[in-house]
Amino acid sequence: MLKESINHFLASYRNGSSDFSVFESIFFRLIQTMPNPPLEITWFYSAVTYHTSKSVGFSNTIVAKDLFQLLISCSCSCNRVKKIALLAPLLYMLYDTVCEFSRSGVCLSNEIRDLVEKVCDYICICLGDRENGNEVDEGIVCFEELVGVWMVDRVGKCAKFKESLGVFFPIVSVEVEKTRRGIRDLAGIVLCEVFLLNLSLKFNSMRFVNEEFQKDARNWAIHTLKQFQNIEFLDLLLRILLEKRLVVTALLSSEDAVVLQKVLYDALILVDHSFPSSGRWFQLPESYFRNLTLLWSLVVDNAVQFAREICDQDRLTAYVNAFSESQLPTELLKWISIRAGTEENLSNPKLMTPKTLIRWLFVLEDQGLWVFDHDRLKFHAKAAICNSSEGKCMGDEEMDDSLDKTFPSAYFCTVKSPTDGDRKRKDRVKDTDIRGTPVKIVKHNVHESPNREKFLPFSDEDMEVMG
């Protein structure tokens, strides 16, 4: 029924019709008869209502407010994850409206800014509700077709789904193409979009970004990260921060974009108050923990490079110290050592940087231990090593000398960006799927191996150099 209704609606719209009352009536009654209406039914009904409102000439602000209230009213009996996932079309519309203001050079209305704040507050309320329903993940039926319904006025009839997806999820379009089509994943996308949009609008509202504002923005980001303790959200946010440029920086001046990066890196890295310092990390399944820790390590490396580029030595030192003092790298090494059968030889250096960790992981992979589950994660890791010639942090240079005796620099820099074909041949799991990933365990008797010193993560000599 849903797919047939979608086809009829698209045909009617493209034929110039603006009367969709039949669809609205049928699906409104359908939703009223369901104690927990599927996301797909609610999306189609709200999409039809959305296009009707636009066709009669209501302003984007009014349409957005009405859509927000409609999605809330249709999800009263849903669990918190579905409530959040349902908001994806609203975030698409809000970002599009903000971009229109930006392109026209007109100051963003307070109504839109306030609405984004209200959406964020509503999500926090949803996340605090742990009593409403089962949160078992569900796939989304007709996902491609439903995106087409929302985008029918923006994307041509023959447009590829990839193009529609990039417009529908503009803030996270770099990574969302590879995301699974589950409700939990969709909720993670919504959390990431509302977090980045809300944060960027705080900059947009200021004529001059001073130290006090930076402190307030950082505190807001830290507070929100603590409330958004969602694994799919954090996984996506970390992956986005591995890219060269954030989409939302297009809304800001170049100076404000730099400050935004500072705020994000500070909130995610500084151990005293960051989400990674939360005990929840250590309660995650192994595949979650390992991949998130690897992602976080790569983001810290990006942050160190960023601090070096803007000549901020204090921030650079703070990031290196936060990484060195964090329990995450130590726990990751412990996990790897146990899998490799060398746990009794694990020794933790007094100072560890992201690059030293990443380089040792490649050494271990060469010995047969599967560390990087996905080609793209491995690509980012090798890119971090290849960029290390621009400068080194405390502890990097000595460790590089030790590694270069074993593996020349060319060894780390022979990777190309993975293509779709490569993924199909090489990846056993989806590129962004951090759940249930298999672990390849190859046992080595390193004590009898002539390459024992090459295999152990940190030898006594390395500890003396770094400590």
Image (cartoon, rainbow, N blue to C red):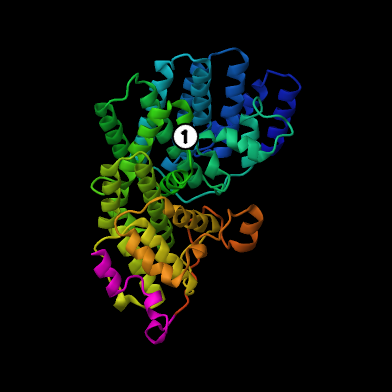
Q: Residue at x 39, y 28 (%)?
A: 255
Regarding residue 119, the answer to whether it shows in the image is no
For residue 105, above or below residue 446: above
- Looking at the rendered image, the quarter that the C terminus falls into is bottom left
Q: Nearer the viewer, residue 222 or 68?
A: 222
Q: Is residue 346 visible?
A: yes
Give the camera-side residue of 212 and 45. Answer: 212
Q: Read off the magenta span.
A: 444-467
The residue type indicated by label 1 comes to: Ser
Instruction: Tell me if residue 236 comes above or below residue 27 in the rendering.
Output: below
The quarter of the rendered structure image containing the N terminus is: top right
Q: Residue at x 63, y 16 (%)?
A: 55
Position in image of residue 26 (x %, y %): 63, 28
Q: Residue 159: x, y in percent?
A: 70, 34
Residue corresponding to mark 1: 75
Q: Is residue 257 left or right of residue 4?
A: left
Is 151 on the left-hand or right-hand side of 347? right
Residue situated furthest bottom in the rendering: 448
Percent of width and height locating residue 149: 64, 31
Q: Name the quadrant containing residue 346.
A: bottom left
Residue nearer the viewer, 100 or 45 = 100
Q: Is residue 411 above or below residue 324?
A: below
